[in-house]
Image (tube, coloured by chain):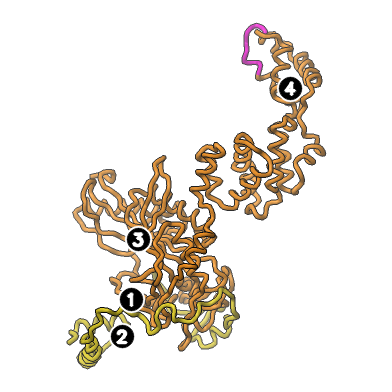
Amino acid sequence: MLSIEEVRRIASLARLTLSPEEERLYAGQLSAILDYVKQLEELDVSGVEPMTHALAAGEAPALRADQVREGLGAERALAAAPAREGTAFLVPRIIE
Amino acid sequence: MPVADFDVVLGLEVHAQLLTRSKIFCGCPTTFGAAPNAHTCPVCLALPGALPWLNREVVELAVRTGLALGCEIQPVSVFARKNYFYPDLPKGYQISQYERPICLGGAVEFTVGGEERRVRLTRIHMEEDAGKNLHDVAPDGSSGVDLNRAGVPLLEIVSEPELRSVDEAVEYLKALRAVLVALEVNDGNLEEGSFRCDANVSVKPRGRERLGQRCEIKNMNSFRFLRQAVEFEVRRQVEVIESGGKVEQETRLFDPDRGETRAMRSKEEAHDYRYFPEPDLPPVRVEPGLIAAARGALPELPRARARRYRERLGLPAADAALIGSDPEVARFFDAAVAAGGQGAEAARRIANWLNGDVARLANESGLPPRAWKLTPGALAELVGLIEAGTVGGPGAKQALEECFRTGASPAAVVREKGLSQVSDASAVEAVVERVLAASPAEVERYRAGNAKLLGFFVGQVMKEMKGKGNPALVNAAVKKKLGGP
């Protein structure tokens, strides 16, 4: 079972604000998901290379040739932007 | 304890922008200087449903770099998501490599204070660059975001913490940069940010085994700033320890205006990037054929080139390193040596002119070697004219300036401008006689034993001859006419 502390940390990393009820709810749901996936641990995979992808290396389609392709252009890129200045997206002040 | 009683331990992470035409996962161009967001598409804007497609050239350039630095190229490597939130990162994660980078090991070799050093590399991996934040673009202080750079391919080259001083760090960086430029994988431009460096700095009391807590410093876009930043940070950490405190692991930003580092607000929270394999990209396989082809195509590297210049042509170490570090200048030099001067003496003269007057003219005009009107053959020709005694130093200098400006042949310039040296003994003697007749008092003092005046007479003769007198002849004629003291 995930602890409330763990749920709070995950929420904070994901920039989510949860109410105390939500924290309890998600602790239960997330734990259920993890338990479900955990069933895979019952399989003996000692002779299997660890996989990171459904396609093994080399089964994938060819890589892309290094050629420039027409993009959207600034106007279309900004078409759905809530705020802009010139052709830059406008966001709240960033402090580094 | 003063700073001198502490050991400094440095590790460097270099981000080098790869010289591809298009971005790493989409076809947008990588060129610098376009209007904000002009070079964007659904992939690099992170629009829903867009999928990355790896640029083959990025893999080839990574392999080339790994081979040149002696890394083990991994037959299979894996892209991973590095998750964090920042306005210049539209997906909310950066596609990078984590547990399985494309290169492991390797080393960078350099010379510092006459000592040969070899600093090992931990790894090299491929990743995408973030966009660019534009500060204070709106009256209310809002920031702008330009995603032209988002998705531009980078190599991250990570050293082991084996650098022991800021001098070593600077020489390491210069050597690494020269290799990347020679390989044509990176343009080496620090100011425009295509070659960037972060430093991990820690200190420990001299002789102590255990490393101190390290701080990561960002934002050093010149060798001078790297030096300032690391020196400041070392002093700061020593002061913290001296006053009984503990150095906290944190990310600090160098402020060039103040010459200081300060903790970054945006990185205050300890980072947990929650890396996981990128599901949108299959593992990268590097075929043995690609490695063999890249190995066969490796150019001569700067240190090997400098060694060749020292050992085969007898160039002094400093000249050899200077020419060897810039592939374009080296190509020019090789061509000039091949064109004209056989032998070490001609090569040395060519190197002197190249590092001296040619470098000055190139600097003043701001032209890279490929844009020079001066050809390697012309420089060789000029050196030939000097060796044959046809033209003296001042005349050659004047001819070079003309050739650099117009691309004319030195022989033609010397002829047309009347720069050739006067090597006719009777003509020289006539001038000497005139000069001696005009300075009877000095002649008397010379004959009375003031031998230093010889230089005065030679100078007067050269002036009279507008610098075109053959120096050996002038010297001999002056001595002869004065009669020896």
Instruction: Judge depth for marks 3 and 4 and give the one in front.
Output: 3
Q: What residue span does the magenta drawing correspond to?
A: B447-454
So how many labels did they put on this image? Answer: 4
Instruction: Judge depth for marks 1 and 2 and give the one in front.
Output: 1
Going by the image, does B249 lie left or right of B289? left
Give the labeled residue for mark 1.
B275
Marks 3 & 4, CB-CB < 8 Å contact = no
- The circle on residue A16 is 2
- Between A40 and A70, the one lying in front of the other is A40
Label 4: chain letter: B
Give the labeled residue for mark 4.
B461
Type of the residue with mark 4: Val
Label 1: chain letter: B
Helix, strand or loop: magenta stretch: loop
State the separation of the CA atoms marked 4 and 1.
78 Å
Does residue A19 appear in the picture of this structure?
no
State the separation of the CA atoms marked 1 and 2.
19 Å
